[in-house]
Image: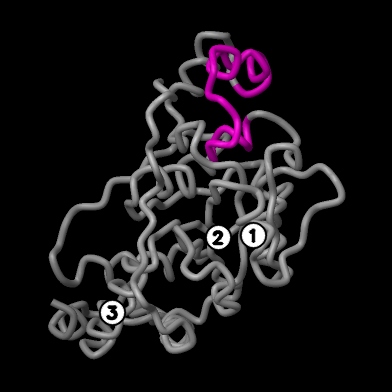
Amino acid sequence: MEHDEEQPVHVRTADIEWDSLLARLQALLRIRTTPIGMKLFRTVEEMEAVSRIRRPDSIHTTDQIVGMAARLNWTVGITQSDLVGAQCGAVLGLHPQDNEWLSGDRMKGVWFETLEDSSAHQQAMDCVPFGTYAAMAVSPLNTKRLNPPDICLIYATPAQMIILINGLQWRDYKKLDWSCVGESACADSWGRALQTGQPSLSIPCFAERRYGGVMEDELLMAISPEDLAVSIDGMEALAKNGLRYPIPAYGIQSDARAGLGASY
């Protein structure tokens, strides 16, 4: 992996009316966890200039920092020195994805049987290239403090998430492909979305649930502000066709013809 070329995150700057957008999202999906934004900064000073930002006074995982925004409604900023180790920082491009990190030595015999397995896992992770960014912040979207965030993080149940995905596919359809590295699944969500700008769904991993407060039935979508707006427009169109959340149970023994006639 090369680190000497500057490869900025896909920062998008559309003028979004967040109060209206979030009200529409909540009306459509009734999500229980605060939608949050994440933004990378080239300098620590830029991060610390964010309104009412908190700085950690202890060492944390990135999962905990994200959880502070999603579960406690805090605006929090960090640098690599605030994180417990290389794994968290490397996903965000705050720590080098160097040979030591790529070796996977710390995971051998813990998450993976052999050093080769551990190294293959590290190689498979989607990470922001190292060298451009010095800090990261998360904040509830309704505070509008990141103005705009690089990506939005939406926690939702599988039923809510498929409706959100259906909304993305309402217009200009394309098949959406996800990845699953297993442990370190933040690489599948915010790592991939920050690196590529593409909507990125993940099954939150052991660490996200243990340290970040992610609930057992939650999935995580990392998505650009523009794509979130596209999904909400799509979900509203689908709702007019009766395809909305919550999805009512039809009955496994009922005659399917009447229901399918309305849906298809």
Name the kind of residue labelled 2 in the image: Glu
Rendered residue at 43%/81% (across/down): 25
Q: Please say if 107 is above or below 45.
A: above
Q: Please say if 12 is above or below 41.
A: below
Q: Please name the residue that numbered disc 2 is placed on.
A: 218
**Which quadrant of the structure image shows residue 225?**
bottom left
State the SS at label 2. Answer: loop
Mark 3 is surrounded, within 10 Å at the Cα level, by few (under 14), some (14 to 19) or many (20 or more) other residues, namely few
**Which numbered tag is attached to residue 159?**
none
State the SS at label 1. Answer: loop
Q: Quadrant of the N terminus?
A: top left
Mark 1 is surrounded, within 10 Å at the Cα level, by few (under 14), some (14 to 19) or many (20 or more) other residues, namely some
Name the kind of residue labelled 1 in the image: Met
Name the kind of residue labelled 3 in the image: Ser
Left or right, 9 with reference to 41: left
Give the percent coordinates (x, y) of residue 243: 27, 81
**Which numbered tag is attached to residue 215?**
1
Which contiguous range is marked in magenta? 87-111
Give the percent coordinates (x, y) of residue 232: 33, 78
Which circle's residue, 1 or 3, is located before the other in the chain? Answer: 1
Give the percent coordinates (x, y) of residue 250: 33, 80
Outermost residue to the right: 57
Is 142 in front, or is 48?
48
Q: Please name the residue that numbered disc 3 is placed on.
A: 254
Rendered residue at 68%/20% (across/down): 110
State the SS at label 3. Answer: loop
Left or right, 55 with reference to 95: right
Measured Cα–Cα span from mark 3 to mark 2 = 30 Å
